[in-house]
Image (spheres, grey):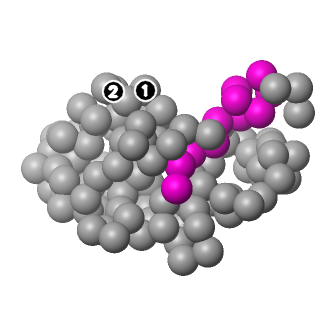
Amino acid sequence: MLPKDRLPLAAPDLSLRQGVVELAHKRLGLLIIVDEDHNLLGVFSNGDLSRLLEDPTHDPNVDWPRPIADWMRTDPLTVDHDSMALAAKELMQKNSVLTLVVTDLDNRVCGALQLYDILRVGI
């Protein structure tokens, strides 16, 4: 699991432009939007960015200064920090995702779990 201090965490008022830069620098493929107490508010992924740019109904001049909260998904897949790795792997495979946000019982972000990490240890 990637610990919280290595995650691309962002405030909801971060601009889309800054969010995309953070996505590129942290290389997790996922920007995790949190409040000041690290409660999970949503996520914005590389896939979300691709869909935004490829959507023929969307204005091609993306409004880059708008807050990332306007673009984030508010129902991200998460796994509890006490969950078993096998359950996390099954959730990832069922939903075709490579990364899950790890939260505690109060929905505060603890880390992130990537499918690669689970496969690397042979689960």
Quarter the N terminus occupies: top right
* In the rendered image, the vertical position of residue 19 relative to residue 119, given as above or below: below
Looking at the image, which residue is at 60% across and 55% down? 102
CB atoms at circles 1 and 2 under 8 Å apart?
yes
**Image-based side of 86 in relation to 48, left or right:** right
Residue 92: percent from the left, percent from the top? 74, 45
Tell me, yes or no, whether the highlighted magenta stretch contains residue 111: yes
Looking at the image, which residue is at 26% across and 62% down? 12
Residue flagged by tag 1: what amino acid is it?
A: Arg
All told, the count of numbered labels is: 2
Residue 71: percent from the left, percent from the top? 33, 57
Q: Residue furthest bottom?
A: 106
Q: Which mark is residue 27?
A: 1
Looking at the image, which residue is at 77% across and 22% down? 120
**Image-based side of 114 in relation to 57, left or right:** right
Q: Residue furthest left?
A: 65
Looking at the image, which residue is at 51% across and 43% down? 3
Residue flagged by tag 2: what amino acid is it?
A: Ala
Residue 99: percent from the left, percent from the top? 61, 41
Helix, strand or loop for disc 1: loop
Residue 38: percent from the left, percent from the top? 38, 64
Residue 44 appears in the figure: no
Tell me, yes or no, whether the highlighted magenta stretch contains residue 53: no
Residue that numbered label 2 is attached to: 24
Residue 111 appears in the figure: yes
Q: Magenta span covers which residues?
A: 110-120
Quarter the C terminus occupies: top right
Camera-nearest residue between 18 and 47? 18
